[in-house]
């Protein structure tokens, strides 16, 4: 496979994986459809894109403006250089930067089962927890609609968004897209309902 063909496969597969094979048929429309399908099938057979993706994810968290993001950019620049591509350019960009705090702790306090530590990670872009921490009752919801219909029940509570990905979806991107809004918009929706914090399950 030529360098350019391999790179095109990489781009296709990062966009498509792990889409069902039927999506390849959808690519067959248009002037370059047959070539797109040929490259995609060859790329799927070689797993080259997955190997690159594996290396990229091993960089770690890649929040905008973070050292991890810069490392990921450099990795992809080097990958393209190794493929023999020419005229690779990095564009300087000014972006906002969010820095995770040193302490990430939460626990469930129950009169019945005692205190249970939780494994948590602060959401990028979220506001800081007050110095004294937050202690409140938890309201569990499965959707924004359920939260909005809860009325005064949400006021002053920690809103726990507990909707998993749909395991029956063949297209995992669709399943992820249906659930990830809890993470991207959960804090804002909790604030609208007058909750004092948002807790979101691991989407996957």
Image (cartoon, rainbow, N blue to C red):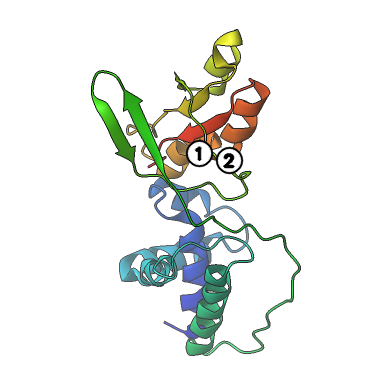
- Other-residue count near label 2 (Cα within 10 Å), few / some / many at <14 / 14–19 / ≥20: some
Mark 2 lies on residue: 184
Q: Position of residue 35 (x, y in %)?
A: 51, 67
- The N terminus appears in which quarter of the rendering? bottom left
> Decide: marks 2, 1 in contact (CB < 8 A)?
yes
Q: Is residue 81 visible?
A: yes
Dot 2: element: helix
- Extreme residue in the front direction: 132
- Which residue is denoted by mark 1 in the rendering? 180
**Residue sitting at x 59%, y 34%:** 187
Relative to residue 32, is residue 17 drawn left or right? Answer: left
- Between 67 and 77, the one nearer to me in the picture: 67
Q: Quadrant of residue 116?
A: top left
Callout 1: SS = loop
Label annotation for residue 80? none
The image shows residue 149, relative to residue 123, as above or below, that is above
> Left or right: 120 with respect to 3?
left
Depicted 54 relative to depicted 193: above or below: below
Q: Nearer the viewer, residue 54 or 126?
A: 126
Look at the image and tell me whether residue 150 can be seen: no
Image quadrant holding the C terminus, namely top left
Q: Residue at point 53% right, 54% down? A: 27
Look at the picture and state if 140 lies above or below 127: above
Query: Where residue 88 sits: x, y (%)?
Result: 64, 85
* Pick the front one: 177 or 204: 204
Left or right of 149: which side holds 105? left
How far apart are the alpha carbons under marks 2 and 1? 6 Å
Q: Badge 1: how crowded within 10 Å, few (<14), some, or many (20+)?
A: some
Where is residue 62 shown, x and y percent of the image? 53, 63
């Amino acid at each position: 496979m030529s360098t350019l063909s391999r790179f095109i496969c990489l781009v296709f597969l990062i966009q498509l994986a792990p889409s069902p094979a039927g999506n390849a048929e959808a690519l067959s429309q248009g002037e370059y459809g047959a070539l797109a399908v040929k490259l995609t099938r060859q790329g799927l057979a070689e797993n080259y894109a997955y190997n690159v993706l594996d290396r990229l994810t091993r960089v770690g968290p890649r929040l905008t403006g973070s050292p991890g993001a810069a490392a990921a950019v450099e990795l992809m620049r080097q990958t393209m250089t190794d493929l023999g591509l020419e005229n690779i350019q990095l564009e300087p960009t000014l972006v906002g930067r969010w820095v995770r705090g040193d302490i990430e702790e939460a626990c469930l306090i129950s009169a019945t089962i005692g205190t249970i530590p939780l494994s948590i990670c602060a959401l990028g872009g979220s506001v800081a927890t007050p110095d004294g921490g937050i202690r409140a009752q938890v309201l569990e919801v499965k959707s924004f609609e359920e939260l909005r219909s809860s009325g005064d029940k949400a006021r002053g509570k920690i809103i726990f968004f507990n909707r998993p990905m749909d395991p029956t979806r063949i297209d995992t991107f669709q399943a992820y897209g249906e659930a990830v809004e809890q993470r991207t918009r959960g804090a804002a929706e909790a604030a609208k309902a007058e909750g004092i914090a948002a807790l979101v399950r691991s989407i996957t």
